[in-house]
Image: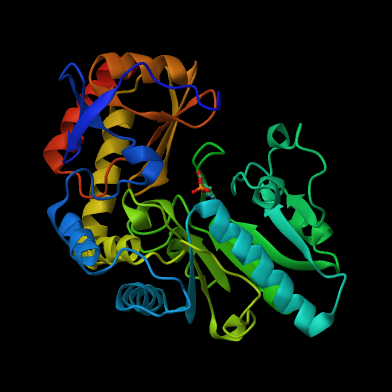
Amino acid sequence: MNTYATLPIEISHGEGSYLYDINDKKYIDFTSGIGVNSLGYNNALWKEAITSQLNSFQHLSNIFSNGSTIALAKKLTELSGMSKAFFANSGAEANECAIKLARKYSFNKYGQGRGTILSLKQSFHGRTLATLTATGQDKFHNYFFPFPEGFDYVIANSISDLKEKLTSDVCAIMMEAIQGEGGVHPLDKDFVLEACKLAKDNDVLVIFDEVQCGIARTGNLFGYNSFNITPDIVTCAKGLGAGLPIGAVLCNENLSTTLVPGDHGSTFGGNPVVCAGGLSVLNQLCNTDSYNEIIYKGEYIKQSILNENIKIVKDVRGLGLMLGIEIYGYSSIIQNKALEKGLLVLTAGKNVIRLLPPLNITMEDVKTGVDTLVSVLS
Ligand SMILES: Cc1ncc(COP(=O)(O)O)c(C=O)c1O
C-alpha cells in the first residue's frame, strides 16, 4: 500500500556501519533502520547466534518452553532488575501488552472505572488503535474513528498539568525518556522524579516506553536510567532485535502474577531465533565499556556540530547515539543532500534531523559521517 514516502535508493547489501546501493555507491548509515540495526550489518556473533538456533528449531508454540527465549528473559531481567518478561513482535505490541497489564493490575485491586492511561503530548507509542490513541499527537488521531477510550494527555515536563490530569480513574502514566518521533526531546529529570513520586503516592503505575531509546542507545541499558528511577513496566523493541522483529515487556515483582494463562499471548512472540539474536545484542552492547563508548561517540558528534557554529543549526540535543539536530529550515532537504553525499540520516518532524547510528560504529566511521554532515549543514 501507499504507506511510506521512500528515499530514492535501493540497497544491495550492508557491512559494518555501511550500506551499498545497487549501483555500488557506499553510504555511511546514521539511521540503523530507525534504531533497529544496533549491531550494524553482517555482525558475525549475532549471525552465529541466530544460525545456531536455526539449526536446532526455528519456532515452537509458547505452550513449549525453550532455552533461547528463557535465556533472553533471564538476561533482560538480570540487567534491568525487573522481575518478568513477556515477548511480542514489535514496539506497538509491547505497548499494547503494557496497557493491558496496567489495566488488569488496577482492575484486580480497584475494580472497573480505573483504566485511564496518561501519556505525554508529542509522544509516540505505535500504530495499533490503542497505541495510536496513546500517542499524544493530534495529527495521528484522525480518520480511524472510533478510537478506544481511556486515554488522556499531559504536557511534557508540566507537573501542574499532570496534577490536573491525575484523576481517580487513572491507572498508569506512560512516557519515553527521550521522545524520539516527537523531535528527540529528552524529558526533564525534575519532571520525571516528581511524576514518579505522584504516581507512587496514588498507586498509579509508571510505564517507560523504551522502544526507541532503550537497549544501550543512550549509553545505558535504558533511557530512564539517567533519572535514577525504577518504573513498574518497561517496553522495548527495535534495537533489541538488531534487525529481527521483537518486542518485550518487563514488569516488577508487584505485577509478576497479574496476567494469567488466557489473558495475553502471541503466536510469534518469543520466537527462539529472534531471542537468540537478542541475547547476542545484550552480550555485545550492554556492558560498561560499550556504554562509555556510546556516550563518548555521541558527545563527539554533538560537540563537532556545535563547534562549527553553523548558521542553520538551532539546537543539538539527545543522549548517547540518539541525537536530534534542530535546524532553521526543512530537515528533509538536509536528508536528501546528505544522501547524495553518501550519508544516511533520519528526520523527526519538519525541522529536526535525527541520528541513530549503529551502536557498535567505529570512531573512524563516526568522524567520516560527522564531516559529511557538517559540510552538508554548512
Ligand atoms: C517510542 C516508540 N514506541 C513505540 C514505537 C512503535 O514501534 P513499532 O513500530 O515496532 O511498532 C516506536 C516506533 O518508532 C517508538 O519510537
304 lies left or right of 77: left
Quarter location, residue 323: top left
Foreground pick, 105 / 1: 1
Quarter location, residue 3: top right
Foreground pick, 69 / 210: 69
User: Residue, x 26% and y 52% (percent of image)?
Assistant: 294
Give percent across and percent down for residue 199: 70, 71
Vertical order, 47 against 352 (above or below): below
- The count of marks equals 0
Quadrant of the image containing the C terminus: top left
Give percent across and percent down for residue 13: 20, 32
Give percent across and percent down for residue 131: 65, 50
User: Residue, x 29% and y 40% (percent of image)?
Assistant: 357
Quadrant of the image containing the N terminus: top right
107 lies left or right of 127: right
User: Residue, x 69% and y 44% (percent of image)?
Assistant: 136
Quarter location, residue 100: bottom right
Colour scheme of the rendered structure: rainbow
User: Residue, x 30% and y 46% (percent of image)?
Assistant: 37
